[in-house]
Image (tube, rainbow, N blue to C red):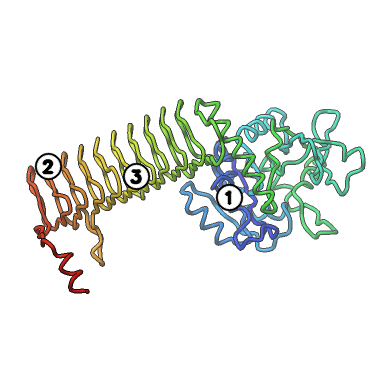
């Protein structure tokens, strides 16, 4: 498949979405529909891809640039149908002469790599110039019907409005996905007829043109009707999300993950979870998340673009762009902000926030504490109510806390400050200077007791 490519149609406006954003960027399980399609094409072997943009082209192109996997784009300035859209990619297709081109709709996120590969294998085996990816559905209303010939190929696709009663009874429908021989497609793109009613050029008409040249056309029926599903409004988008959610949850269950109750559980398509991990209600895993084995995640936890080791327990934890190593326990009500690393065996208690910090092996941050912009060693203990004061109003500074240090309750570490190995701070201290190893730092006013002060005040006030 080295000379194969994909053209993704993403120029539509999607007015019924009632959104100022491009329709193909509407999300299914936190991932734009276009992203699902691009990833499926790449997983099926068509890694050289061209996206045809139109409405909100700058927004779509910005998303493509953020993906880091490289896609070309062409613009369909005037949207005149699917055939016209593919024609905009003619130069891209010409560079793949002799190969095969996959054409997909950018708003059909459940088109999967397995169906694409199956269609390609049938395409090659049958020697087709075009192979339509089809699906057999319970209710074909609104879709183009596949017209099969007795010889086993197809002789066309008829839209429902043009179908007779017999054709309307056909339940095999067009998904909008195709494999073409590049040479055959380029030969007929310029000959597509203009529809007299809509004034548009339809890619489906390429089938008749190729057959007229004595070439072969076929259809590959995907194993699931999900491949044809798109979304034209928010109701359909919600249905897509629910369908995708069920498929993802069941996929993890079949891989050995325990999800005893799926209430409120949302797991994105790019999440990996190890066997024997338990996902509890209210848990949301989005972006590129990796979780090891024998973990308990939830209830009510949110992980985004983070890595979690094995034997980890996260209860009501929010974690963003960070790493949690084996054996960590955290929660409830913990916020782990980006660029943090909790090393093996760390314990984080309730109402703790950690930001842009490393917390070393076996260290404990039990409760009501903020650790920001800090490098914390191994087996350090933070008492209740501690704060690393990392912002001086102009810049952020880091604290360093060496191994086995003990930070007493209600200590403020005024960054930049360095606590040496086995260094202690007394409860209630505000530490502004470095603390040597094995030293105790006390930074608080001496207590003064005034006997009978309250009674005297009461007498004075009358």
**Residue tagged 2:** 421
Q: Earlier in the sequence, mark 3 or mark 1?
A: 1
Whether residue 26 is visible here, answered yes or no, is yes
Check the picture and name the quadrant holding the C terminus: bottom left
Whether residues under marks 2 and 1 lie with C-beta atoms below 8 angstroms apart, the answer is no
The residue that appears at 67% across and 57% down in the rendered structure is 17
As drawn, 86 above or below 168: below
Say what secondary structure mark 3 lies in. loop
Q: Is residue 264 left or right of residue 428?
A: right
Q: Where residue 374 sits: x, y (%)?
A: 24, 50
How many angstroms separate mark 2 from mark 1 (CA)?
A: 49 Å
Q: Nearer the viewer, residue 173 or 309?
A: 309
Whether residues under marks 3 and 2 lie with C-beta atoms below 8 angstroms apart, the answer is no
How busy is the neighbourhood of tag 1: few (under 14 within 10 Å), some, or many (20 plus)? Answer: some
**Residue tagged 1:** 27
Say what secondary structure mark 1 lies in. strand
Q: Nearer the viewer, residue 344 or 95?
A: 344
| Picture disc at residue 378 | none
Q: Where residue 415 sits: x, y (%)?
A: 19, 57
How many angstroms separate mark 3 from mark 1 (CA)?
A: 33 Å
Q: Where residue 433 sits: x, y (%)?
A: 11, 56
Q: Earlier in the sequence, mark 2 or mark 1?
A: 1
How many angstroms separate mark 3 from mark 2 (CA)?
A: 26 Å
Say what secondary structure mark 2 lies in. loop
**Residue tagged 3:** 350
Which of the 4 image quadrants contains residue 226? top right
Q: Is residue 10 left or right of residue 335?
A: right
Q: Earlier in the sequence, mark 3 or mark 2?
A: 3
């Amino acid at each position: 498949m080295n000379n194969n490519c994909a053209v993704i149609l993403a120029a539509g406006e999607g007015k019924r979405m009632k959104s100022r954003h491009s329709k193909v960027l509407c999300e299914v399980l936190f991932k734009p529909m276009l992203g699902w399609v691009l990833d499926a094409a790449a997983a099926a072997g068509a890694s050289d891809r061209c996206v045809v943009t139109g409405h909100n082209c700058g927004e779509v192109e910005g998303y493509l640039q953020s993906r880091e996997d490289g896609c070309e784009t062409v613009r369909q300035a005037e949207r005149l149908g699917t055939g016209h859209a593919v024609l905009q990619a003619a130069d891209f297709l010409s560079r793949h002469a002799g190969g095969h081109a996959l054409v997909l709709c950018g708003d059909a996120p459940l088109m999967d790599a397995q169906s694409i590969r199956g269609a390609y294998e049938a395409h090659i085996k049958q020697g087709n110039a075009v192979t339509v990816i089809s699906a057999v559905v319970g209710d074909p209303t609104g879709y183009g019907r596949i017209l099969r010939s007795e010889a086993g190929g197809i002789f066309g696709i008829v839209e429902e409005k043009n179908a007779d009663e017999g054709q309307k009874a056909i339940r095999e429908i067009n998904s909008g996905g195709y494999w073409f021989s590049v040479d055959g497609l380029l030969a007929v793109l310029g000959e597509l007829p203009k529809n007299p009613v809509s004034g548009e050029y339809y890619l489906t008409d390429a089938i008749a043109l190729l057959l007229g040249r004595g070439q072969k056309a076929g259809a590959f029926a995907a194993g699931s009707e999900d491949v044809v599903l798109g979304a034209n409004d928010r109701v359909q988008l919600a249905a897509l999300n629910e369908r995708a959610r069920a498929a993802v949850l069941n996929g993890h269950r079949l891989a050995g993950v325990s999800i005893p109750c799926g209430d409120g559980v949302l797991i994105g398509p790019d999440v990996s979870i190890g066997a024997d991990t338990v996902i509890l209600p209210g848990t949301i895993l989005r972006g590129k998340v990796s979780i090891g084995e024998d973990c308990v995640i939830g209830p009510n936890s949110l992980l985004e673009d983070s890595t979690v080791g094995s034997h980890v327990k996260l209860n009501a934890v929010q974690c963003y762009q960070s790493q949690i190593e084996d054996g960590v326990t955290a929660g409830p009500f913990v916020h782990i902000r980006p660029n943090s690393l909790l090393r093996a065996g760390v314990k984080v208690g309730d109402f703790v926030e950690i930001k842009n910090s490393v917390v070393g092996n076996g260290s404990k941050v039990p409760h009501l504490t903020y650790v920001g912009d800090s490098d914390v060693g191994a087996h350090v203990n933070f008492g209740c109510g501690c704060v690393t004061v990392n912002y001086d109003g102009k810049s952020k500074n880091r604290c360093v806390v060496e191994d086995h240090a003990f930070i007493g309750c209600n200590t403020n570490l005024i960054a930049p400050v360095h606590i040496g190995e086995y260094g202690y701070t007394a409860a209630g201290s505000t530490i502004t200077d470095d603390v040597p190893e094995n030293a105790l730092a006390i930074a608080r006013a001496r207590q003064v007791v005034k006997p009978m002060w309250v009674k005297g005040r009461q007498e004075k006030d009358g």
